[in-house]
Amino acid sequence: MDEAIELILHGIGHSGPTSEQERNDAENIAKALDCLPIALQQARSYMRETRCSASSYLERLLASRDRLLSQPVKYQLGMRYLSTYAAFEASYERLEQRAQQMLQFLSCFHWSRFPLEAITEAAKFNFSDYELEYNDHGEEYHVARAILRDLFLRDGQWNILDLDKLMISLQTYSLITLTPGADTKLLEIHPVLHQWVNSCLLAQDKPRYQSAAILLLALNARFDYTPARQYLSGHVMHLAPLWSRMHINDVIAFGLILKNGALYEDASRLLERSINELRGEGESEPILTDVLWQLAIVYRCCGKLNEALLINEELLKAWKIHQGDRHPNTINATSNLAIVYHELGRLKEALDLHEHALNLSKEIFGEKDALTLMLFGNLGTVYSDSGRLKDALMIREETLKLHEEVLGNQHPDTVEESPSSRIWDGFWGDPKGR
C-alpha cells in the first residue's frame, strides 16, 4: 500500500512533504483500484496530464469508474497498453472461447475465495442432482445445467484435467490467482478485472451465467462435510440481489449453505420463505419436514428458542403420524424437542422425553447403535443440570464403556466421555482426588 501511495503522489508532482489529506486521498485511490499496478500507473498518468489533484481524481473515479479506466493516456516508456481496460481486453482476446466463458462465469461470484472443489463436487452429481429437491425445476435450471456441462464436460464426460487446463490458461495471462485453502484451492480475480468482466457480459448472457452460478452453489448444499463448504456463504451472499427470483429448490439450498456457514439470520429468511411457499402450494407434511428440521436448527443456533420449540413440536407430531413412534426419525425428533426444553430450562419435560427416547432406541437398535450412544450423552447432561449427579455419573460411565467398545479409546467421542468432563468434575469435586 505504501508503494502505491508514493506512486500516486509522485504522479501529481510531489517532491517534498505532503499533507495528511493528500496522503489520505492517495490511499483512497489505491484502495479503490485495489493496488492494481496498471490501474495505478494509469491514474498517475491521468493526474499528471490533466493537472488534477488526487481528491479530484478520486471524485472522477467514483462517479465514472468504467469510463475513466477505459480512458487512454499519453504513451510513456514501459507502458504496453494505454488504459487499464485495454490491457484486460488484450489478455481476454488471447483466450480460447471456453476460457473466456469460464472467466465470464466466475465474474458472477464474489471475486475472492472461490473454492475450486465446488466444481468437482458438482461434477459428482452430474451438475444436476440436489441434496433437497421439492418442485420440478424451471427453465432457468435447464439453461444453467447446459452452461455448466458445456464448460466442464468433454463429450459428456468429466475429467479434472480439463479444469486444470482452464486454470492454466487463465493464469498464463495473470487473470486469476490460485491460493491454498483448507483441502481445496481458492481462486481469486482482481476486483478491478472482476468488475470489468462482469460489466462486459451481454444483456442476454448475464442472467444465464447468473443462473449457472446459482446452480453450482445449490449443488454444493450438502448435509455431509465437503472441502468447499466453509467458503460458500460469501458467494451466496454476493448473489443476494437475485434471491427474490430464485426457484424454491435454490432457496432451500442457499438456506442450507448459510446455516452451515453460521449466517443464521439470513438462513432463517430463506428457509422461512421456502416453508411459506411449500405450505401455500399445499405440500404434505413429509415434504415439509426436511426444511422445518433445518429451520429448527437455525432458530436454536440464533437463540430463538420459542420458535424452535414450536417447530420441534410440529416435527415430532408429523413423524409420529407418518412413520410411527419407533422410527429413528421420530426418536431423533423426540430428542431434539427434549434439547429445546432443556435450553428453555424446562428440565422435567426434557428429562421425560430424553428417557423415553433412550429407552426406545435401546430396545429397537441396541445399546451400541450411534443414535443410542448420542441419546445416552444427552440424558447424562440433563441429569447433571438437574442436580442428579449420581444418575449422571452412572450414565456417563455406561456411555464411556460403550464408546470404548464401539469406537476405541482414542476416538474423539470416547475422549469427550472421559473422566475429565464437566459431569465427573461436578460429582467428585477435584477429579484428581477421585
Image (spheres, helix red, strand yellow):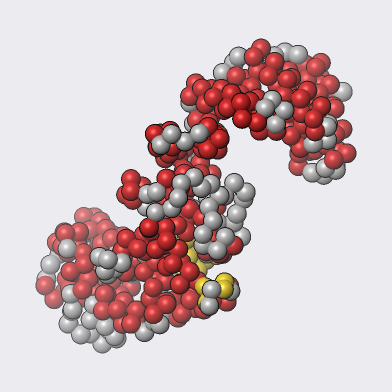
User: For the view shown, which residue lies furthest in the bottom direction?
Assistant: 77
Residue 324: percent from left, percent from top: 67, 27
Q: Using the image, determine if residue 81 lies above or below residue 58.
A: below
Q: Position of residue 359 (x, y in %)?
A: 78, 23
Residue 181 placement: quadrant = bottom right
- Dividing the picture into quarters, in which one does residue 317 lie? top right
* Vertical order, 105 against 411 (above or below): below
Q: Say if residue 327 shows up in the picture.
A: yes
**Camera-side residue: 419 or 51?**
419
Residue 11 lies left or right of residue 431; in this view the side is left
Q: Nearer the viewer, residue 116 or 337?
A: 337
**Residue 429 seen in the current view:** no
Is residue 13 found left or right of 431 in the rendered image?
left
Query: Where, quadrant-wise, is the C terminus in this rendering?
Result: top right
Q: Nearer the viewer, residue 142 or 384?
A: 142
What is the quadrant of the N terminus in the image? bottom left
| Residue 57, image x, y percentages | 17, 64
Residue at 47 percent of width and 36 percent of height = 283
Q: Residue at x 59, y 56 (%)?
A: 227
Instruction: Tell me where residue 433 sits by quadrant.
Output: top right
Residue 152 rendering spot, x and y as whole percentages: 50, 71
